[in-house]
Image (spheres, helix red, strand yellow):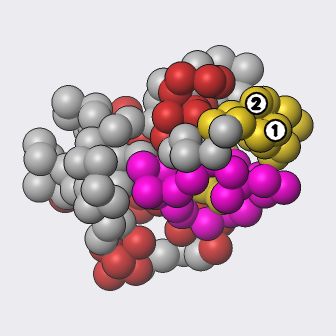
Amino acid sequence: MKNILRLTLNQRAREDLVPDHMLLLDYLREVVGLTGTKQGCDGGECGACTVLVDGRPRLACSTLAHQMAGKHVETVESLAKQGTLSKLQAAFHEKLGTQCGFCTPGMLMASEALLRKNPHPTREEIKTALAGNLCRCTGYVKIIESVEAAAAARCGEEVHP
């Protein structure tokens, strides 16, 4: 069975006819065409599919699309504005927080949620915020440094390793 899903996606109102059983991840990738959100483990354990729902991190692989009715959903595509990387994206690039890049969208969205709530997080707070996001390439040091650099850049400071 299909029903109309009404939500705000990346600051734009949408209405789509969506199967009742469709996951948010599949809705984003297959219906809307936003492929930045990745399918990793398909079991809610890796965080690659992290999006923001009403400003809070949520795993798209374990959320039904229809649960988003009336909500504000943000994907990694929402971070860049008019082709310009956000400070967070730029920090990941400059501080080498991305290697293969598969986990990066989820890491970015979890980090974005943290920085909105806490513009000056400690290293431990960053680790806690990213605890649900797995990376098989970096060892996390560069990811944490990237979030620290983004926090500093948002406040007009400079971070030194």
Furthest-right residue in this view: 13
Numbered mark located on residue 99 in the image: none
Q: Where is mark 1, residue-wise? A: 4
Alpha carbon separation for disc pair 1 and 2: 4 Å
Compared with 154, 25 (above or below) is: above
Q: Where is mark 2, residue-wise? A: 17
- Residue 71 lies, in percent from the top left, at 78, 56
Q: At x 67% / y 58%, what residue is drawn?
A: 67
Question: Does residue 61 show up?
Answer: yes
Question: Does residue 24 show up?
Answer: no
Residue 40 colored in magenta in the image: no
Is 152 on the left-hand or right-hand side of 9?
A: left
Element class at badge 1: strand
Of 80 and 61, nearer the camera is 61
Element class at badge 2: strand
- Residue 133 lies, in percent from the top left, at 30, 59
Compared with 152, 26 (above or below) is: above
Q: Amino acid at mark 2?
A: Leu
Compared with 147, 118 (above or below) is: below
What is the span of residues highlighted in magenta in the rendered image?
54-73
Q: At x 58% / y 33%, what residue is drawn?
A: 28
